[in-house]
Image (cartoon, grey):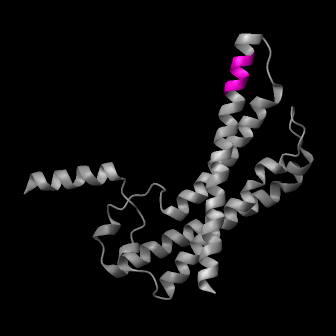
Amino acid sequence: MQKAMDTSVHRFFKLLELLVVVCMVAMVIMVFGNVVLRYAFNSGISISDEMSRYCFIWLTYIGAMVAMREGGHLGVDTVVKHLPVMGKKVCLFLSEALMLFCNGLFFLGTWKMHELQVSNVSVVVGISMIWIYGIGYVVATVMGFINLNVLYRLLTGQIRDDELVQVIETEGLADVGKHMQGNRG
């Protein structure tokens, strides 16, 4: 059962990564094509500006979900990494609980704006704006489940000590840190 769930989650995030690529390619094609049409043929495609902007909105939010799952968001671990294990657990709990609260607010805000966005129609394309800003439902739900998963693992003792600090250093910064430590010795 757990294996099937892990496979489903993995496939879902692979689909999100594919959507990021599709949005990026669509943006490049629309913007580049419009630039060529404007300069070479003195014309353009009116929907390309609006659709590329919508692709960028979705790309940003989908990328945020993928980055959260991979632990790729920015963070500061200066104090947390020096705390004892219990201090790290408390900080992780507070961090995840606050993020879960923010995701709840994000979902609630999208819900409260739903009626306005459904009736609001984009100027050029003519689609309901809920198709653009409704991504808030998806993002808040997915990120909320990620927060709940970490909290569940923390409270049931399933989280490893090396997972208590959620900041992952980039390769370049880790190399600089090792180099600096080597020069001190």
Relative to 121, residue 38 above or below: above
Residue drawn at x 73%, y 23% is 34
Residue drawn at x 82%, y 25% is 46
Task: Pick whichever, 151 or 90, lies toward us.
Answer: 151
**Is residue 104 among the parts visible in the rendering?**
no
Residue span colored magenta? 32-37
Relative to 178, residue 22 above or below: above
Name the spot of residue 111 as percent of width and height, x first.
80, 60
Relative to 90, residue 60 above or below: above
Name the residue furthest right. Answer: 119
Task: Pick whichever, 172 or 136, lies toward us.
Answer: 172
Name the spot of residue 63 as percent of width and height, x first.
59, 52
**Is residue 184 among the parts visible in the rendering?**
yes
Name the spot of residue 97 as percent of width and height, x first.
56, 72
- Figure quadrant of residue 152: bottom right
Query: Residue 34 colored magenta?
Result: yes
User: Taken as a whole, is the magenta stretch helix, strand or loop?
Assistant: helix
Residue drawn at x 9%, y 54% is 184
Name the residue furthest left. Answer: 185
